[in-house]
Amino acid sequence: MQPANLWRWQGKVERRNYAVVGLTALALKLLVDRIAVTRLFGRPWSLLSYWRPFGAISGPRSLSPDDQFFAAVMLLIAAPFVWLGLAMTVKRLRDAAQPTWLAALFFVPAVNLIFLLTLCGLPSQMRVEGEEGAPWPGPQVLDRVIPRNAAGCAFFSIIATAVLGYLLALIGTQVVATSYGWGVFVGLPFCLGLFATLTYSYHRPRRYGECVAVALLPIGMLGSLLLFLAREGAICLLMAAPLGLGLALLGGNLGYVIQRAHWGRPKITAALSVVMLMMPGFYGVESITRPQPGVFVVKSTVEINAPPAKVWRKVVAFAEIPPPHETLFRAGIAYPIRAEIVGSGPGAVRHCVFSTGPFVEPITVWDEPHLLRFSVRANPAPMDELTPYGHIEPNHLHGYFESHQGQFLLTELPGGRTRLEGTTWYSHSMWPESYWHLWSDYIIHRIHKRVLDHIRAEAEL
């Protein structure tokens, strides 16, 4: 119970001391937080603030600069308490003869409260020191399952990680989170890279190049599984690849550092267990918080050698556009074909027909020949997945990309010319939002270009 020993991971702590330190740290943390929130930032504070301090958000990018500074300060305040809590929990597990990988439950919301209270009641027990970090199914089983030679161990690590990744991807998108978010695109590839490296280095330390290769290859194999088992299409997988491979590389680097620090077999197996627990916990948090998507705006312009009155007629409705030659659209991304309208003026309904179906667009502003603005009542699927099969329907084809509003702005230029600007307001429910909107912005610009170029060609005839 000496202050210096409280922060160390080595040793044991009995339940009474664990409870005393835990309650003292909790009281101190609440006091420090209350002072920081109310006095330093002048914000209201309550216990509910720990659950959702900023309400429903789409990620750090959606926070104001003041909120970002507030979050950074509160994380700095929390860091020593997290370290203390984890160190004490590991020692308490060791004293109670429980596997130390259970310390991962410290980060699982709601479950961690039950877990910590249980540790306060478990009696001290004796056991063999070498079994201290043993997870399920036990080191003796993993010793037999994981090959000892380098090639066999690498093959096992890659296959096991890819299969585990496939199962976790299904859990994340179909069962727990039912979303394509931080858990699937950030947490999963990072954990898979870490898991593969730790598995590969289970029996002995490995070189950096080997760890990197073992971390990255399962991501490619996972993509192949999702493609050939009709879970995803090729275009979506290619768009996700830079993010997934980068995070898998980061996880592999962490795994390399861990195994280079000469973790013993019990610690490696404990780390493997922590990784396996992290993903369901990540999915659970994401499912509870349900971040709300932001709205993005994409604008594209073209100059046309025709007066606004002539361009207007082609904007309101245009004839069929020739088949696309762009690889993007030929690969399955939805593309515009023609535009039809029923009626005129506000209240008229425009249908912009895409390769996957029509956008239904009630007109809200009809300022001829200057501004045509419309809302979007119905969205078709954003793509036909490129797949070896006839047709597949992943969840993200329905409700994950939504166009909310659009407009065409016509500006008269000297010499009887017109600047035509097309604008789309849209949102998507795929995270990290800042990554995926780079793809969606690019795609919408290409769609705008196809429409604007066609209107220019028709108006200049």
Image (cartoon, helix red, strand yellow):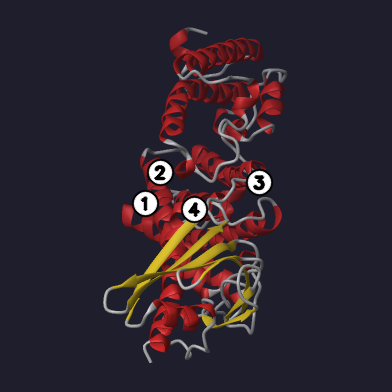
- Taking the spot 49% from the left edge, 82% from the top edge, the residue there is 313
Secondary element under disc 3, as helix, strand or loop, is: helix
Q: Residue furthest left?
A: 415
Task: Tell me residue 271's x, y (percent).
Answer: 52, 41
Counting residues from the N terminus, which is met first, the one under dot 4 or under dot 1? Answer: 1
Name the residue beneath numbered marker 2. Answer: 259
Q: Quadrant of residue 120?
A: top right
Q: Amino acid at mark 3?
A: Ser
Counting residues from the N terminus, which is met first, the one under dot 3 or under dot 4? Answer: 3
Counting residues from the N terminus, which is met first, the one under dot 2 or under dot 3? Answer: 2
- Marks 1/3: CA–CA distance: 37 Å
Give the number of the mark in front: 3 or 4.
4
Label 2, residues with CA under 10 Å away: few <14, some 14-19, many ≥20: many
Task: Tell me residue 77's x, y (percent).
Answer: 46, 21
- Marks 1/2: CA–CA distance: 8 Å
- Taking the spot 38% from the left edge, 61% from the top edge, the residue there is 213
* Camera sees residue 64: yes
* Camera sees residue 221: no
Q: Are marks 1 and 2 in contact (CB under 8 Å)?
A: yes
Name the residue beneath numbered marker 3. Answer: 287
Name the residue beneath numbered marker 1. Answer: 206
Counting residues from the N terminus, which is met first, the one under dot 1 or under dot 2? Answer: 1
